[in-house]
């Protein structure tokens, strides 16, 4: 008796799925045009994942909450989003969202609530905030825990109506691994970039003006600060309680107190930076096992101030140029600032190089016994021109064994290395 062969149920399901795939139309992302006078909030409520909300020129009410993934909110020249003055002008909750091309104003004014122009929540991985203008926001952009977010090409003006201590940071990062802050122009906030308890971040190519700190890291590890320009701030780059950083090719020009400040920052590479002007080019406080190489420190009251331990650091190939005090090390432990026969350049070093090797024939000692006395007892400055002080300094020159210890450079350079970042300094 003939029995027809019945296909296996799995084969039937696979065939139906293939037929559906061949006949179904692919989903297409839509563009929702929003004209002046229309509600951006209402338009956003109609958006599906992957859609673009395009705002025409004009002002739109903000307080947007973006909870659809992969949505883009974009503007054209003249598009402005005005927050209500409470909370966030834009709150991003979904992953893959892009905010670009807008002027964003009017966040709330409460620091404890993290009121921001754009607040990116921890559920909003891969957010992109790019090519916007931020005005009159307490915080411009807050990355509150997303992974791999990008803040790029924005122009940020802080709240100049508030006192400096009352302002928020322009861009704040908290526990946002892999996120990047790139090519932004930042002015008049409290800190330019403030990062806390984060890792694998990049802060690159930004310009900072009129701030307390240009870049401020706390407990931010395995991260990079590169190619930034800090001009006329209180301090340029403040790196605290952070390990394994790469800090390179940055410029600090005329920052008032410090160009670079390291406090409990360990195991980092600090290379090819330029600091010009200010009280201290570099302040190093209990920062250990770092490498300082190829940097240019010029025109400060103190070139580098080492204190509170700061052990195991390599200092090589740097240029100390026309600082009133090239090196200030308050301690008696003997530290050689040369590595594998290569030291640093000091503009006040009168040594010769009879061998023509590029290395001075004699060691350089930036501090003597009287420096140590004056740092510990500033009133002793009254005696600087006395015969007794001159005798002590003559004796140290004649009998080097009576030097008090501290920093010396056994292989000082005859010519200064010139990092590429020098070309970015204004004449």
Image (cartoon, rainbow, N blue to C red):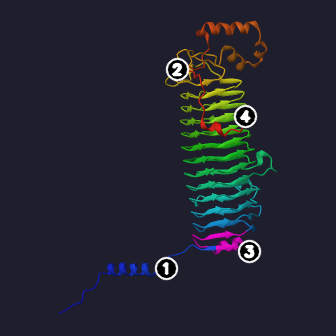
Disc assigned to residue 38: 3
Q: Which residues are magenta?
A: 32-56
Residue 112 at x, y = what percent? 71, 53
Q: Earlier in the sequence, mark 1 or mark 3?
A: 1
Residue nearest the observer in this picture, 137 or 364 = 364
Task: Provide the residue designation for mark 2.
Answer: 357
Q: Earlier in the sequence, mark 1 or mark 4?
A: 1
Residue 88 at x, y = what percent? 71, 61
Q: Earlier in the sequence, mark 2 or mark 1?
A: 1
Image vertical order of residue 163 relative to residue 116, above or below: above
Q: Nearer the viewer, mark 1 or mark 4?
A: 1
Q: State the count of labels.
A: 4
Give the CA separation, mark 2 to mark 1: 74 Å
Q: Could one spot residue 22 in this view of the protein?
A: yes
Secondary element type, mark 2:
loop
Task: Provide the residue designation for mark 1.
Answer: 25
Q: Nearer the viewer, mark 2 or mark 1?
A: 2
């Amino acid at each position: 008796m003939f029995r027809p062969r019945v296909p296996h149920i799995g084969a039937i399901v696979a065939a139906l799925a293939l037929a559906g795939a061949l006949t179904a139309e692919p989903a297409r992302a839509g563009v929702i045009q929003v004209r002046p006078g229309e509600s951006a909030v209402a338009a956003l409520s109609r958006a599906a994942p992957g859609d673009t909300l395009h705002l025409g020129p004009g002002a739109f009410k903000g307080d947007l909450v973006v909870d659809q993934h992969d949505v883009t909110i974009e503007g054209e020249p003249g598009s402005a989003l005005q927050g209500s003055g409470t909370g966030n002008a834009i709150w991003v909750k979904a992953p893959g969202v892009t905010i670009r091309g807008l002027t964003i104003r009017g966040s709330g004014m409460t620091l404890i609530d993290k009121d921001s122009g754009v607040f990116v929540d921890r559920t909003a991985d891969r957010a992109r905030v790019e090519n916007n203008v931020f005005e009159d926001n307490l915080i411009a952009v807050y990355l509150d825990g997303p992974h791999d977010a990008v803040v790029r090409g924005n122009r940020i003006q802080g709240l100049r109506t508030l006192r400096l201590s009352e302002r928020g940071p322009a861009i704040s990062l908290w526990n946002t691994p892999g996120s990047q802050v790139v090519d932004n122009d930042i002015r008049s906030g409290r800190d330019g970039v403030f990062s806390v308890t984060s890792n694998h971040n990049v802060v690159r190519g930004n310009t900072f003006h009129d701030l307390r700190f240009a870049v401020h890291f706390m407990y931010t590890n395995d991260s990079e600060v590169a190619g930034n320009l800090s001009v006329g701030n209180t301090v340029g780059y403040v790196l605290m309680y952070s390990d394994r950083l790469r800090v390179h090719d940055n410029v600090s020009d005329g920052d008032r107190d410090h160009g670079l400040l390291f406090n409990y920052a360990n195991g980092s590479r600090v290379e090819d930076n330029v600091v010009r002007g200010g009280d201290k080019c570099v302040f190093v406080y209990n920062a250990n096992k770092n490498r300082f190489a190829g940097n240019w420190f010029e025109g400060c009251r103190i070139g580098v101030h080492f204190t509170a331990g700061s052990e195991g650091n390599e200092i090589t190939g740097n240029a100390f140029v026309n600082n009133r005090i090239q090196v200030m090390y308050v301690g008696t432990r003997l530290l050689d600032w040369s590595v594998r026969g290569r030291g640093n350049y000091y503009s006040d070093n009168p040594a010769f190089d009879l061998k023509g090797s590029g290395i001075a024939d004699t060691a350089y000692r930036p501090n003597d016994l009287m420096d140590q006395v004056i740092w510990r007892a500033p009133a002793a400055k009254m005696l600087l021109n006395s015969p007794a002080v001159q005798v002590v300094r003559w004796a140290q020159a004649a009998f080097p064994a009576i030097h008090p210890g501290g920093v010396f450079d056994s292989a000082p350079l005859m010519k200064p290395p010139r990092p590429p970042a020098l070309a970015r300094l204004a004449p």
